[in-house]
Image: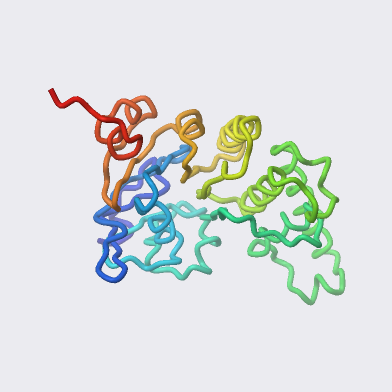
Amino acid sequence: MHNNEVDMNGLVLKIEELSIAFGGLKAVDGLSFEIKENEVFGLIGPNGAGKTTAFNCITQFYKPDSGAIYFKDRKGQTQNLLDHGVHEIIELGLVRTFQNVELIRELSIIDNVLIGAHTDFKATIFSQAFRFPKAVKEEREMRAKAYKILETLGIEDRANLPVGGQPYGILKKVEFARSLISNPKLIILDEPAAGLNDVETIELASRIRKIRDELGCSILLVEHDMRLVMDVCDRICAISFGKFLAKGTPKEIKENKAVQVAYLGIEVDHD
């Protein structure tokens, strides 16, 4: 199927029959789901369910054995992500955060954020090094944009402080900000609540919604904290052992018997 034949009306991502095996063990087995534009979409499942493998396929860290992953890029064109290398994904408008925060401790918070904009800088390294007017203007605009994102996340007062020594909750926000500066169409958040306390997790939920509303991007949330998932997601896909289990609103997922058994470990009365 050609990219222009895929119906992506109202969608930002469409996964069809995705499968990948490691040493004969199927980590993801015929998985299909779609994410709408401006939607917060949750992917849940018990440990070993294949969540991380699935999004590693989306971001092309892994090449799946079969299936297709269609993505509507920043220009509104449909791309099959399997046709692209991992280094090209961010340029299409798809970014991810990591469970382990990957920041440069010696740099300021705002400079760490600006690293995320490297693909968007038009000025050459030569013109930046010699401070040509066009390069200076571009850097000033990008810095203002970075500051605005820090403002959205509520940490603009720390913009010029070094990353080293900042609390863990702040570091997670800095990484989040760095993923936002490249104007993504879709952000994959990998366990964003890991290491956060209850207050920070509640605040994270409101920030995720705010980012979706103000920046107009979709969010794929891969998360163990079920309170966060249920609170912030529009729809959720549950998987188990790499296979599709259920899809629906938080209420529908919470009441789904198969999810209760596989994920929550609840005994279900079959009478």
Check the image and report above or below for 70 versus 230.
below
The foreground one among 207 and 140 is 207
Whole-percent x and y of residue 92? 51, 59
The foreground one among 97 and 150 is 97
Check the image and report above or below for 47 versus 130.
above
- Colour pattern: rainbow
Q: In this figure, what is the number of numbered marks?
A: 0
User: In which image quadrant can residue 4 be found?
Assistant: bottom left
The foreground one among 263 and 171 is 263
Q: The C terminus lies in which quarter of the figure?
A: top left
User: In which image quadrant can residue 52 be found?
Assistant: bottom left
Whole-percent x and y of residue 43? 40, 43
Check the image and report above or below for 268 versus 77.
above
Whole-percent x and y of residue 172? 66, 47
Q: Residue at x 32, y 35 (%)?
A: 265
Whole-percent x and y of residue 228? 51, 33
Q: Residue at x 78, y 54 (%)?
A: 163
The foreground one among 5 and 15 is 15
Horizontal side of residue 178 vs 209, given as left or right? right
Q: Residue at x 39, y 40 (%)?
A: 10
User: In which image quadrant can residue 111 be found?
Assistant: bottom right
Q: The N terminus lies in which quarter of the figure?
A: bottom left
